[in-house]
Image (tube, rainbow, N blue to C red):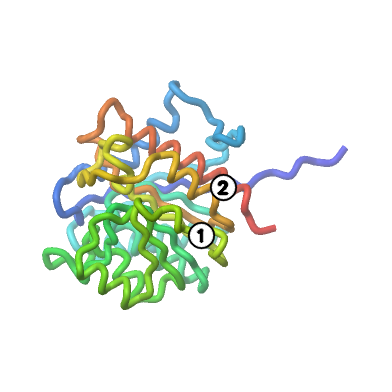
């Protein structure tokens, strides 16, 4: 009888940070809300491919941070925590927190992957030089990450609030920016190398995800985002799910969407692992 090979777990890391939010606080409550939804008795452990993924997640807790606006110490603590998971050979799903967490996460990924493609779902491009004097704002993570060469390619899906400054930034860094109206133009088969997925829940239409600070009608559906995940060629080496604000949620609806994305991302990571 052949021994069954054990499956290395995927780390689940929380970052309870919302001090870099520009409108409302509340996203610091996001990690625990998604965890509660993930383990809710209203669902089960299986994803859509009938893989029982939840037991394969190793919840390593939250990063210890002060949750202070514009804090480089908080950013460094996030980078260090992610670096530790990657050094252990783990794939990683991170739960935010506001979108500012993505920049320090990508700094750690840059140390391991010099050919990273980032697929970013969002209503907003998040490439401001700074917002309200805060270069670490949740509206600026991709400006910082692009400046430091954290990725070789950035593809943004669901964008529907691009100011002229954002258009200029996209041209400066050769960013692919696709609106919901043009989602069919996204060609996942053209992506090469390791992939990191950043899912801002306000990339979804508010009818699918009311529990966010910035409602922007006309967004993607849950199924459209799942189709994007399914189409990614991989390997998918990491992901984050950010901007859940439980204080604005309705019957935990958005938290359940976040938990759904955790399960489907975990399944995609497992299915597309490098040999």
Q: CA distance from mark 1 to mark 2?
A: 17 Å
In the rendered image, which residue does mark 2 sit on?
268
Front tag of 1 and 2: 1
Indicate the position of residue 58 as horizontal and vertical percent values: 51, 43
Residue reaching furthest to the left: 132
Q: Secondary structure at mark 2?
A: helix
In the rendered image, which residue does mark 1 sit on?
187
Closer to the N terminus: mark 1 or mark 2?
Answer: 1
Left or right: 52, with 152 as reference point? right
Q: Residue at x 20, y 47 (%)?
A: 214
Instruction: Name the one closer to the observer, 251 or 91.
Output: 251
Indicate the position of residue 134 as horizontal and vertical percent values: 16, 65
Indicate the position of residue 272 as horizontal and vertical percent values: 62, 53
Residue 140 against residue 272 in the figure, above or below: below
Classify 10 Å Cα crowding around label 2: few (below 14), some (14-19), many (20 and above).
many
Instruction: Name the one closer to the observer, 237 or 153.
Output: 153
Instruction: Name the one closer to the observer, 130 or 110.
Output: 130
Residue reaching furthest to the right: 1
Which quarter of the figure has residue 75? bottom left
Left or right: 149, with 1 as reference point? left
Q: Residue at x 49, y 52 (%)?
A: 92
Instruction: Name the one closer to the observer, 117 or 77.
Output: 117
Indicate the position of residue 211 as horizontal and vertical percent values: 26, 37
Q: Residue at x 56, y 31 (%)?
A: 46
Classify 10 Å Cα crowding around label 1: few (below 14), some (14-19), many (20 and above).
few
Residue reaching furthest to the top: 41
Which quarter of the figure has residue 275? bottom right
Quarter that holds the N terminus:
top right
Q: Residue at x 31, y 71 (%)?
A: 170
């Amino acid at each position: 009888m052949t021994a069954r090979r054990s499956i290395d777990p995927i780390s689940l890391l929380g970052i309870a940070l919302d001090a870099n939010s520009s409108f409302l606080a509340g996203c610091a409550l996001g990690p625990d809300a998604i965890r509660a939804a993930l383990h809710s008795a209203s669902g089960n452990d299986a994803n859509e491919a009938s893989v029982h993924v939840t037991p394969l997640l190793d919840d390593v807790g939250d990063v210890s941070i002060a949750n202070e606006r514009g804090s480089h110490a908080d950013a460094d603590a996030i980078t260090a925590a992610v670096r530790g998971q990657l050094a252990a050979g783990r794939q990683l799903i991170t739960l935010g927190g506001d979108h500012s967490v993505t920049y320090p996460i990508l700094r750690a990924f840059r140390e391991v992957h010099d050919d990273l493609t980032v697929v970013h779902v969002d209503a907003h491009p998040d490439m401001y030089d700074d917002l309200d004097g805060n270069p670490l704002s949740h509206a600026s993570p991709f400006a910082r990450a692009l400046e430091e060469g954290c990725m070789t390619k950035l593809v943004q899906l669901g964008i529907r609030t691009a100011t002229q400054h954002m258009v200029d930034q996209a041209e400066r860094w050769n960013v692919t920016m696709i609106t919901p109206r043009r989602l069919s133009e996204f060609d996942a088969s053209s992506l090469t190398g390791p992939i990191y997925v950043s899912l801002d829940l306000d990339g979804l239409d508010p009818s699918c995800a009311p529990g966010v600070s910035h409602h922007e009608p006309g967004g993607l559906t849950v199924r459209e985002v799942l189709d994007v995940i399914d189409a990614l060629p991989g390997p998918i080496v990491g992901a984050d799910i950010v901007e859940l604000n439980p204080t604005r949620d309705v019957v935990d609806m958005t938290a359940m969407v976040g938990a759904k994305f955790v399960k489907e991302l975990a399944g995609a990571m497992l299915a597309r692992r490098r040999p």
